[in-house]
Image (cartoon, helix red, strand yellow):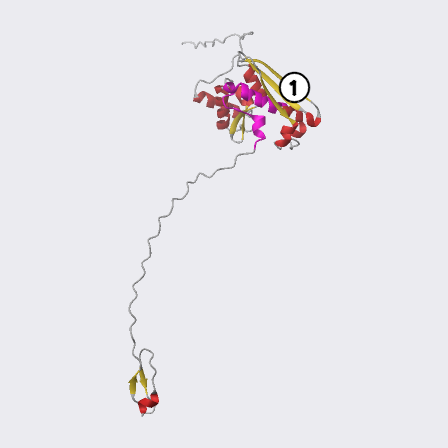
Amino acid sequence: MNAVVQMETHRPALQSGGAVRAIVPQDFDGAWRIANAVVKAGMAPRGLETSEKAMVAIMHGMEVGMTPMAALQSIAVVNGRPTIWGDGAIGLVRGSGKCEWIKERIDGDGDNMVAICDVKRKGEADPIRATFSVADAKKAGLWGKQGPWQQYPKRMLAMRARAFALRDGFADILRGLGIAEEVQDAPAPDARSVTPPSPPRAPSPPQIAAPVEEAETIEHEQVVEETGEVIEAIQDGEPFDLDAFLS
């Protein structure tokens, strides 16, 4: 009788100090599997609750050099457009290797506050400066707007100045991604009608008047009461003297 020998499966020992690497999909199926897992786990950010939306966010993030999980935390869909949060944008620019430094500050108080953001690219002589003031916010209808503009006015001014500076100085890094804080304040575009205009109507054919038939002369008869004689009525409106006729 042969004895069944159970072979122990070799398990690699746990090791510490190894390099931490993100799981990066290599194809469409891999991106879908990660997106689906995140959604089923209930860890998808608000606005990315479906596997399709999460996968699109992952794909956009990977196009600018982000790992899948970083993309899910940094990419937001605003007004139907993929955008990147301001903190994600500044991290992306600093990690690109093309940024020498970024300096941000707010000058003034009250209605005189101005947010200033200076960015310097490596290899370029002059930095790029962008500003956004309380006057700019009032002109755009943002100052005092319900939400973050009332709760964190200084932060919102700084985010606007940062968005301008990063888009002006590092458009090649952002690759068309808008800054979420900026796009959120923009009005949603109105739906446009894509129905083609109706073709012009062909001109109606000229109407031909029906030929006018010659009027038929109807002869009328007249009865003389005194004699009972039947006579023809006078045509063409000629006067008729009955007394002369009877005499």
Q: Residue at x 29, y 85 (%)?
A: 231
Asked which secondary structure carries label 1, the reply is: strand
**Taking 120 as reference, is 188 above or below it?**
below
Q: What is the span of residues highlighted in magenta in the rendered image? A: 158-186
Asked which quadrant contains residue 138, the reply is: top right
User: Extreme right residue here?
Assistant: 109
Q: Nearer the viewer, residue 40 or 62?
A: 62
Q: Nearer the viewer, residue 203 or 186?
A: 203
Q: Nearer the viewer, residue 47 or 225?
A: 225
Circle 1: residue type: Arg
Could you tell me if residue 91 is visible in this image? yes
Q: Residue at x 50, y 19 (%)?
A: 172
Asked which quadrant contains residue 111, the reply is: top right
Q: Position of residue 167 (x, y in %)?
A: 54, 22
**Taking 191 as reference, is 5 above or below it?**
above
Q: Quadrant of the N terminus?
A: top left
Q: Which residue is mark 1?
A: 105
